[in-house]
Amino acid sequence: MSKLIIENLSMIYHTIEAETKAIDNLSLEVLEGEFLSIIGPSGCGKSTLLSVIAGLFPPSSGRVILDNMEITKPCNKVGYMLQRDHLFEWRNIFSNITLGLEIQGKCNNESILNIESMLEKYGLSSFKNYYPHQLSGGMRQRVALIRTLAIDPDILLLDEPFAALDYQTKLAVSEEVYKIIKQEGKTALMVTHDISEAIALSDRVAVLSKRPARLKNIYDIKLSVENRTPLKSREAPEFRHYFNAIWKELDIHVE
Amino acid sequence: MLSNNFSKEHELYLRAVKRRKAAIIIVQILILIIFFVQWELTAKYKIVDPFLVSQPSRMIKFMGKLYNEGMLFRHIWVTCYETVIGFLLGTIVGTLIAIILWWSDFICKVLDPYLVVLNALPKIALGPILIFWVGNGKTAIILIALTISLIVTIISVLTGFKEVDEDKIKLLKTFGASKSQILRYVVFPSSIPTMISALKINVGLSYVGVIVGEFLVAKEGLGFLIVFGGQVAQLDMVMLSIIILSIAAYLMYEAVAILEKKFTVWKS
Ligand SMILES: Nc1ncnc2c1ncn2[C@@H]1O[C@H](COP(=O)(O)OP(=O)(O)OP(=O)(O)O)[C@@H](O)[C@H]1O
Ligand SMILES: [Mg+2]
């Protein structure tokens, strides 16, 4: 079943100097419960796409439909996780997590209990009174994820969620984030630069063209591993084939 | 995260740090003592003319006289009161105007050249006009202090507001935050360090405003004592007032520094 439908979406930015076409007639469907990655060259319009889906600004043309409703403004069914964690230094971990709830006026006993249980489940409860600078990069990223999950969205938009982490941490954190998303039963749409990361986490990988972003191809990732997790996926024999295919599709030249 | 079982080496290190800190404080105090002792002595043996530069013992005597007349704390109080009020008004009004300018980019762009001109203008020049409007007295002095700190406050607070990370604002927007929520949840709190450094500058500026104001109109206050002392060739009065003024300014600056620590607990 389709969760999110992107229909003939185009987006043009206007500045005094220029007019930049960031997205060109892009159509894409995200299925209920699936993990879809979007991969594309730098500056092709990936973040723009997520911002439009999040309802931060209207597209120049086309529509975004979530559960049969067109998205025109930010809505609490969508959780957006930005590239950097953006934890607020002046708030402790717990009140960083309640930020979204406070803004939406939904900070009640039930939501607090839900947060407490997530902190417990994901090994952060002893840190809830700490301040962000006292946490490691990986922990901060998990906190950012829980902050996004706290408003109980149906679909998660992840904009290069692991880009700021070093390689080892990235492997560990993506493993955990993947498990959390699956456990909470969320649909996820992730933007990344990293081909292996895209294959390791996703059910499908969409490849975009250079700017303006157009859909080039979609890969169904079928790996012969049991109880799939990102780390196990990397050991699947098919992993390499997908990697090569997507690498060719991206058609990146060093100039 | 502190542990009390330090290694020997670490204890030595801590002791060295402490010793250095103590040394700095001792030298600072010594400088003060030496300065006043040499002042007293050079004046006493007429190496410098006490009529021109006064003398610590004469200043103390004068202080005692003021105290007995019940005027010492009166003068200090008047000046500090005017400064604190001018300072608070400058900060609050300046921050409010900065919020308006942040809120409406249009107003901000429209007013930009006027702010630049007002910032460049020596606000003291407005003193006579303010006195003409509100009369000789405390109100005029407070207004002069206010005008001096106002524009700087507006500009530095607004700069702080505009430096807030766009992505943090974007994050709030994804939660559906309104403009006033963006102000309350991210713009204001993340500008607190900028605002506090504006406050620190304002302490000094407000004192300048108050003293100039008192030069122009006052019948009491430390600025008044300074001008009056100069007119009647009473350097004891002038020097004493200046020293009290420095202490008062220092204390107020420290108060702001304590405020800063309180608002930035999350840093430690
Ligand atoms: N607010 C804006 N105004 C004008 N142009 C913009 C704006 N935001 C982005 N652009 C332009 O739109 C294009 C796409 O930007 P976008 O950030 O969506 O790319 P991206 O694929 O996320 O890039 P990256 O891989 O570097 O994250 C870029 O060329 C960028 O310069
Ligand atoms: Mg991007």
Image: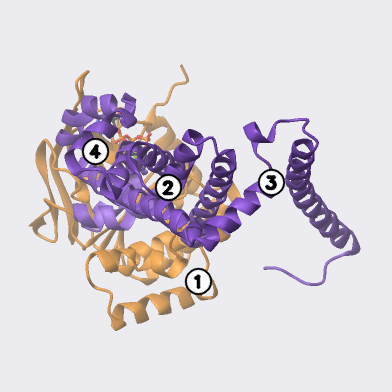
- Which secondary structure, mark 3? helix
| A237 vs A252: above or below | below
Assess mark 3: CB under 8 A from ligand 1?
no
Query: Which mark, by number, is residue B56?
Result: 3
Mark 3–mark 2 Cα distance, whole angstroms, equals 33 Å
| A229 vs B31: above or below | below
Give the residue number, with chain letter if any, for mark 2.
Answer: B199
Judged by depth in the image, the label closer to the viewer, 3 or 2, is 3
Residue located farthest toward the right when viewing the structure as drawn: B8
Give the residue number, with chain letter if any, for mark 4.
Answer: B131
Q: Amino acid at mark 2?
A: Leu
The mark nearer the N terminus, 3 or 4, is 3
Mark 2–mark 1 Cα distance, whole angstroms, equals 30 Å
Mark 3–mark 1 Cα distance, whole angstroms, equals 54 Å
Assess mark 2: CB under 8 A from ligand 1?
no
Query: Which mark, by number, is residue A129?
Result: 1
